[in-house]
Image: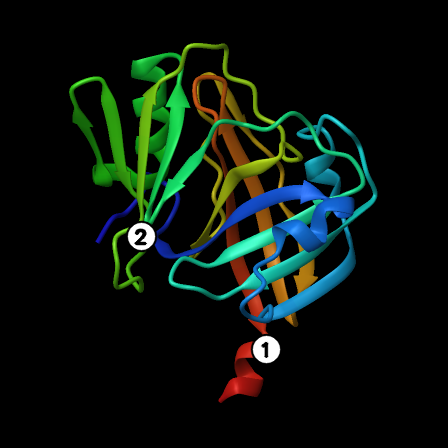
């Protein structure tokens, strides 16, 4: 088990977010299956606004419960695409400062962070996940900039068994805010680093009426 310092336990990797324009919805969404659930016009939380290039009041959410769950988020406007790539169950992102990037990931994942040459490897799975979900950070050529409304992959969401509150030395951990999505009452915060171009959304589930209905 991986226990993060002062921040409880990562229970599950919930999903990766893929961002696109509302006008591109038909092109972006998978054509071979239906979404697990949809939330149209979902309110953008206050804690998101400072992390977006274009402030917007709402978004459309399409959740696909696949081998690695993907949450497609559609805004009226989006920022320039980031450079995060997916290859099967592995995501490739970038760092600008090696030591600070290691410190940032270790603050979330603890001992699941390892070094391979100039690459930083991190297994994002929680204690309930059966498969490895790898994040590999490689040296970036450009300055790291993160926005929640950047096109493409950009936010990895984790389920924690308590509130996360660790602030990285070169980044942020937002305040917590509650929202209900698909009958789940969630307590959410975001954490990011100026040295890494992937953001983490960390959720504590307060109640799960959707889960109750499945039983």
67 in relation to 146, above or below: below
Residue 208, how many percent across, how many down?
A: 57, 73
Give the residue at mark 2. 125
Instruction: From the viewer's side, name the closer residue of 121 and 212.
Output: 121
Instruction: From the viewer's side, name the closer residue of 151 and 215.
Output: 151
Residue 143, how many percent across, how many down?
A: 50, 10
Q: Which sits earlier in the primary sequence, circle 2 or circle 1?
A: 2
71 in relation to 85, above or below: below
Instruction: From the viewer's side, name the closer residue of 60 and 29.
Output: 29
Note whether residue 44 is visible: no
Q: Which mark is residue 139?
A: none
Give the residue at mark 1. 210
Q: How many marks?
A: 2
Q: Quadrant of the N terminus?
A: bottom left
Q: Element at badge 1?
A: helix
Residue 111 sits in quarter: top left
Q: What is the C-alpha distance between the residues marked 2 and 1?
A: 22 Å
98 in relation to 113, above or below: above
Residue 79, how many percent across, how many down?
A: 69, 27
Q: Residues within 10 Å of mark 2 (few under 14, many from 20)?
A: many
Note whether residue 26 is visible: yes
Q: Element at badge 2?
A: loop
Residue at figure coordinates x 64%, y 60% from the top left: 62
Q: Tell whether 71 sits left or right of 99.
A: right
Residue 26 sits in quarter: bottom right
Residue 16, how many percent across, how many down?
A: 48, 48
Residue at figure coordinates x 52%, y 86% from the top left: 214
Q: Residues within 10 Å of mark 1 (few under 14, many from 20)?
A: few
Residue at figure coordinates x 48%, y 27% from the top left: 83
């Amino acid at each position: 088990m991986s226990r993060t310092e002062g921040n409880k336990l990562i229970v599950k990797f919930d999903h990766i977010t893929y961002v696109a324009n509302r006008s591109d919805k038909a092109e972006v969404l998978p054509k071979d299956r239906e979404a697990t659930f949809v939330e149209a016009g979902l309110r953008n939380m206050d804690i998101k606004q400072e992390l977006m290039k274009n402030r917007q009041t709402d978004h459309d959410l399409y959740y696909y419960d696949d081998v690695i769950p993907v949450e497609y988020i559609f805004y009226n406007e989006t920022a320039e695409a980031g450079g995060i790539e997916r290859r099967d169950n592995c995501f490739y992102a970038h760092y600008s400062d090696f030591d600070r990037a290691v410190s940032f990931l270790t603050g979330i994942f603890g001992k699941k962070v390892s070094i391979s040459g100039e690459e930083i490897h991190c297994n994002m799975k929680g204690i309930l996940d059966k498969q490895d979900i790898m994040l590999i950070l490689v040296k970036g050529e450009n300055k790291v900039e993160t926005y929640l409304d950047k096109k493409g992959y950009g936010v990895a969401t984790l389920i924690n068994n308590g509130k996360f509150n660790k602030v990285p030395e070169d980044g942020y951990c937002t305040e917590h805010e509650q929202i209900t999505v698909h009958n789940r009452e969630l307590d959410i915060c975001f954490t990011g680093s100026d040295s890494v171009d992937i953001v983490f959304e960390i959720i504590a589930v307060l109640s799960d009426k959707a889960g109750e209905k499945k039983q």
